[in-house]
């Protein structure tokens, strides 16, 4: 079969999207006049940030000679640690992967993580060193490291410069020669994997599929294994730069299907598409992803709840790692508690909701999921501060999630990186030297220490050279307490936090100072307090705006002035009891700038 399905996997900024551009050019998939940089990154957000967020499938028709034509299905993948789930979904639809490494930066944390993902999926890995045109490229040194890592001969490691188009023909030959063709039987009963999906206002939900066995064509009836929903297919097609309808997709093909699917819950990424009456054993699908970071989204206007609910339903169809459920807050009204894989994932979701659905949202402080063990031995999960009991009468222990972090850094910055990990309550699990100039540090760190500013500070202390990757290892018992933030005596759940007891006092004081600057002055006094188990540990006051009520008086008896001032004082006292404090989004985000 002249079909090859492959992905490009690499650490962030190692040149995946640029290499995809050169493959599109060489196979004449896109006319030269339509070419631009990172052509597969079609989201404005991807182009602005210079990163890939969504995996992008596309078919390349390659003719190495006049008689032979190969059908290459490429799925470009993200490189950031928060989007590993996109990589795993893409790899499940492939037989091979190009492992791309920057000739200067070398093997980094996400390179190793993606390699292990590919090996778990039993993929053939083709090692590629990119950016060989750079003056300080370490080609020979990296060839040895890559061959050792992948388990091949040094001469099997390909050399390319995606920017200058060097080595592209050799790369295409290697894809054809080394990556195996799909092995499915086109005459067998239909079995197709849903690896992604999107929503179209006119055509409903559109699943992206990899046909493993059998055929799928227009007019055929299908059934989704996990939801048992039945539909009639109205269109099947392939991916070029847009969706191109075809007569049928057979075993080994990557494409999409349209079946007027209006009920979004009928489709699940990782599900198997089958024929009714010829049902077979479903495909393994994907490991269910558990969100690591939680925060709440609230509409800024009272009538924004339903548009937000509709937008989250559609968004969830396109992003399988995103979770949400309805909740309410006395301060912010009705909203949704949302789960994400990391801080970048959270930022991207919020930005996409604003751009694609026009939603202006109030976002609360990110937290992680804790576990609480009662004295009777039962356990329950805590995703928000309000769910953690204030007293410890019924609580035996509070447990927090820990991650195993692998940090690759030049040896010269090792001291700075170790100091940062210890600041985050990290425990060293060892170190390795892949070569004399670099070291791999392994630490067990609480997830709460990773999510907010670890990435930024790691880049800062290593002048941008260190990279990291992490995986959840489980829960450990910690001395955690609930820190409540009170505004005029009322507890404000969205600003409250769960913190380690040793750092609660300093965290509370810093947060109160930040909030004093972030909350604008009102017509009445605003008292901001931090409380630990009923004990006030910090207090700041936002002074009221003063209207000059005596301006209209001129001369006369001083008692008239006093009377007006007393009346104003009584009004302010009443406003303080019943007036709503205007809290801007900056107040919620002030928490993020506090380094524990």
Image (spheres, rainbow, N blue to C red):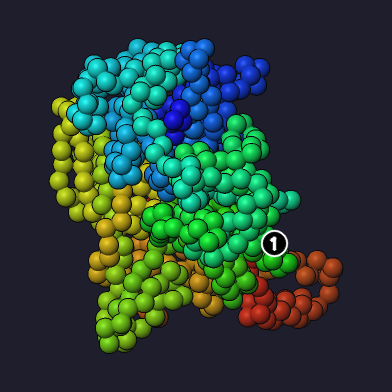
Q: Position of residue 167 (x, y in %)?
A: 40, 14
Query: Taking the image as drawn, is residue 462 in sight?
Result: no
Q: Position of residue 112 (x, y in %)?
A: 29, 38
Q: Is residue 16 left or right of residue 115?
A: right
Secondary structure under badge 1? helix
Q: Nearer the viewer, residue 194 or 434?
A: 194
Quadrant (top left/top right/bottom left/bottom right) for the C terminus: bottom left
Q: Nearer the viewer, residue 529 or 2?
A: 2
Q: Residue at x 83, y 74 (%)?
A: 556
Q: Which residue is mark 1?
A: 307
Q: Nearer the viewer, residue 409 or 284?
A: 284
Check disc 1: other Cα within 10 Å, few if <14, some if 14-19, many if 20+.
Answer: few
Q: Position of residue 335 (x, y in %)?
A: 60, 68
Residue 331's quadrant in the figure?
Answer: bottom right
Residue 78's quadrant in the figure?
Answer: top left
Query: Taking the image as drawn, is residue 197 in sight?
Result: yes
Looking at this view, name the residue that lies furthest to the front: 187
Quadrant (top left/top right/bottom left/bottom right) for the N terminus: top left
Q: Residue at x 25, y 27 (%)?
A: 146
Q: Residue at x 24, y 31 (%)?
A: 150
Q: Is residue 24 left or right of residue 104?
A: right
Q: Residue at x 57, y 66 (%)?
A: 336
């Amino acid at each position: 079969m002249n079909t090859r399905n492959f992905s490009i996997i690499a650490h962030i900024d190692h040149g995946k999207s640029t290499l995809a551009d050169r493959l599109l050019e060489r196979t004449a998939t896109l006319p030269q006049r339509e070419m631009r940089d990172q052509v597969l990154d079609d989201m404005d957000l991807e182009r602005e940030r210079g990163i890939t967020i969504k995996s992008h499938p596309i078919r390349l028709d390659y003719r190495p000679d006049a008689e032979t034509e190969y059908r290459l299905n490429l799925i470009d993948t993200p490189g950031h640690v928060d989007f590993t789930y996109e990589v795993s979904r893409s790899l499940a639809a492939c037989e091979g992967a190009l492992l791309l490494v920057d000739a200067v930066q070398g093997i980094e944390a996400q390179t190793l993580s993606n390699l292990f993902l590919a090996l778990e999926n039993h993929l053939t890995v083709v090692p590629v060193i990119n950016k060989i045109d750079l003056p300080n490229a370490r080609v020979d040194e990296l060839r040895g490291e890559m061959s050792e890592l992948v388990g091949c001969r040094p001469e099997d490691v390909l050399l390319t410069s995606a920017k200058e188009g060097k080595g592209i023909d050799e790369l295409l030959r290697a894809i054809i020669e080394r990556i195996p063709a799909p092995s499915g039987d086109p005459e067998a009963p239909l079995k197709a994997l849903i690896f992604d999906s999107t929503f179209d206002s006119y055509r409903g939900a559109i699943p992206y599929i990899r046909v493993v066995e059998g055929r799928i064509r227009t007019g055929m009836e299908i059934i989704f294994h996990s939801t048992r929903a039945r539909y009639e297919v109205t269109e099947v097609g392939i991916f070029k730069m847009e969706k191109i309808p075809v007569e049928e997709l057979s075993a080994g093909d990557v494409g999409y299907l349209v079946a007027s699917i209006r009920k979004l819950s009928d489709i699940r990424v990782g599900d198997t598409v089958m024929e009714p009456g010829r049902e077979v054993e479903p495909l393994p699908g994907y490991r269910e992803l558990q969100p690591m970071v939680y925060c709440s989204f609230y509409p800024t206007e009272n009538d924004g709840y339903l548009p937000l609910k509709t937008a989250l339903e559609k968004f969830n169809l396109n992003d399988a790692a995103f979770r949400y459920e309805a909740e309410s807050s006395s301060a912010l009204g009705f909203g949704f508690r949302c789960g994400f894989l990391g801080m970048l994932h959270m930022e991207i979701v919020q930005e996409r909701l604003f751009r694609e659905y026009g939603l202006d949202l109030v976002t609360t402080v990110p937290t992680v999921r804790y576990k609480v063990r009662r004295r009777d031995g039962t356990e329950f999960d805590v995703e928000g501060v309000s769910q953690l009991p204030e007293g410890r009468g019924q609580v035996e222990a509070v447990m927090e999630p820990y991650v195993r972090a692998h940090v690759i850094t030049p040896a010269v910055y090792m001291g700075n990186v170790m100091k940062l990990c210890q600041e985050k309550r990290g425990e060293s699990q060892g170190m390795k030297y892949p070569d004399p100039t670099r070291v791999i540090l392994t630490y067990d760190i609480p997830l709460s220490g990773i999510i907010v500013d670890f990435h930024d500070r790691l880049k800062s202390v290593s002048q941008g050279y260190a990279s990291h990757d992490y995986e959840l290892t489980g829960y450990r018992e910690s001395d955690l307490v609930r820190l409540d933030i009170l505004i005029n005596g009322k507890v404000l759940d969205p600003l409250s936090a769960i913190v380690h007891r040793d750092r609660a006092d300093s965290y509370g004081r810093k947060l109160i100072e930040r909030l004093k600057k972030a909350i604008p002055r009102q017509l009445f006094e605003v008292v901001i307090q931090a409380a630990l188990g009923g004990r006030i540990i910090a207090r700041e006051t936002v002074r009221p705006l003063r209207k000059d009520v005596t301006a209209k008086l001129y001369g006369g008896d001083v008692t008239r002035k006093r009377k007006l001032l007393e009346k104003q004082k009584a009004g302010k006292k009443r406003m303080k009891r019943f007036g709503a404090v205007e809290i801007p989004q900056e107040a919620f985000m002030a928490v993020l700038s506090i380094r524990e």
